[in-house]
Image (spheres, grey):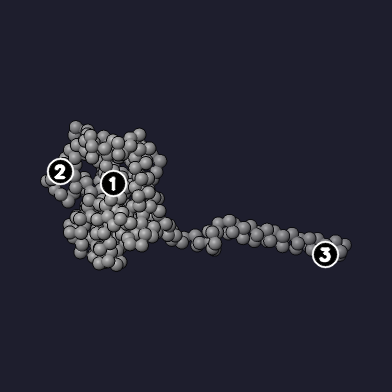
């Protein structure tokens, strides 16, 4: 009898040890399957790691854009729709803020906010930034500038005029982060336009807008995009639409919708603003993209 009791205790102890071993192994295996390549598992609430965004080449060393992705982004239109919106706090409250060209924030903070994480700039707007270097480059050295344009203007190897100008800016302000789109990235953006519209950009006489390049970058960089001040593709054909300036900082000049419609109808050298917005609407059905002021969604 005593032998049977001892045998039972031994078996119970062995079973307990086996269960503990299985539990420990299971936890270890779980940790191993979640390890990043070549390293230990990250803490559950660790900040996102920096990623390399190919197609964006740093001035002057050519390194790709590298930074952590943004969970939430505000993409701020330069449209006159922003006037009187009082959305500045909401915009600045997003993790990252993307702006376009030379749209200022000074004097418009209540409507458009003050922060700028990334500023996407057309080669045609670079001279406008150069005229106000203390504002754009001296005071805003935390902003990442992403400049796009044709190879003849932007070529690093052939020292295009826009690239030379950017090189001088970086020499003057060494902390600045300026990137240019590579020729491969420019071709990719053309291909996206053709795939989405069925039209070859060159043959159709179309110019891509800075908004096009900004949206493509935002979809690469951001998990959620909140677009402020961008109208949809039918807005300018509505009878009761409001008339606003093309740019919020150029009051009394070009009317936004008149400009959009003129470009859309132009046989050559036209920005297809309305066509692009129809594409954005389709993208919003599949991606986490929200449009506000005015509010609309992919239909």
Q: Label 2 to label 1, Cα distance in Å?
A: 18 Å
Q: List the residue tagged with mark 1.
A: 211
x then y, percent, for residue 140: 26, 62
Q: Residues within 10 Å of mark 3 (few under 14, many from 20)?
A: few
Comes first in the chain, label 2 or label 1: 1
x then y, percent, for residue 202: 30, 39
Q: Which residue is nearer to you in this view: 272 or 155? A: 155
Comes first in the chain, label 3 or label 2: 3
x then y, percent, for residue 58: 34, 59
Q: Nearer the viewer, mark 1 or mark 3?
A: 1
Q: Label 1 to label 3, Cα distance in Å?
A: 79 Å
Q: Residues within 10 Å of mark 2 (few under 14, many from 20)?
A: some
Pointers 3 and 2 in contact (CB under 8 A)? no
* SS category of the residue bearing label 1: helix
Residue 297 seen from this side: no
* SS category of the residue bearing label 2: loop
- Image side of residue 105 versus residue 6, left or right: left
Q: List the residue tagged with mark 2.
A: 254
Residue 172, compared with residue 229, is above or below; it is below
Q: List the residue tagged with mark 3.
A: 6
Q: Where is the C terminus found, in terms of image quarters? A: top left
Residue 277, compared with residue 61, is above or below; it is above
Comes first in the chain, label 1 or label 3: 3
Q: Residues within 10 Å of mark 1 (few under 14, many from 20)?
A: many
* SS category of the residue bearing label 3: helix
Pointers 2 and 1 in contact (CB under 8 A)? no
Residue at x-position 36% and y-position 45%: 187
């Amino acid at each position: 009898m005593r032998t049977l009791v001892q045998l039972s205790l031994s078996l119970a102890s062995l079973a307990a040890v086996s269960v503990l071993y299985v539990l420990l192994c299971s936890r270890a295996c779980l940790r191993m399957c979640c390890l990043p390549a070549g390293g230990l598992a990250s803490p559950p609430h660790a900040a996102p790691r920096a990623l390399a965004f190919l197609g964006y080449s740093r001035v002057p060393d050519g390194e790709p854009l590298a930074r952590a992705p943004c969970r939430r982004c505000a993409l701020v239109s330069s449209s006159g729709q922003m006037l009187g919106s009082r959305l500045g706090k909401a915009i600045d409250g997003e993790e990252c803020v993307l702006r376009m060209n030379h749209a200022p924030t000074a004097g418009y903070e209540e409507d458009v906010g003050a922060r700028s994480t990334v500023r996407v700039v057309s080669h045609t707007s670079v001279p406008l930034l150069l005229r106000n270097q203390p504002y754009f480059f001296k005071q805003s050295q935390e902003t990442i500038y992403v400049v796009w344009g044709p190879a003849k203007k932007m070529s690093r190897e052939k020292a295009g005029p826009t690239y030379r100008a950017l090189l001088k800016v970086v020499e003057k302000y060494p902390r600045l982060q300026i990137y240019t789109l590579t020729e491969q990235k420019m071709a990719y953006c053309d291909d996206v336009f053709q795939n989405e519209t069925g039209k070859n950009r060159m043959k159709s006489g179309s110019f891509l807008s800075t908004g096009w390049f900004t949206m493509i970058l935002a979809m690469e960089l951001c998990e959620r995009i909140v677009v402020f001040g961008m109208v949809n593709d039918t807005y300018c054909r509505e009878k009761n639409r409001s008339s606003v300036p093309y740019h919020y900082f150029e009051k009394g000049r070009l009317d936004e919708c008149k400009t959009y419609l003129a470009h859309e109808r132009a046989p050559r050298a036209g920005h297809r603003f309305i066509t692009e917005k129809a594409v954005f609407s389709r993208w919003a059905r599949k991606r986490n993209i929200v449009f506000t002021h005015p509010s609309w969604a992919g239909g």
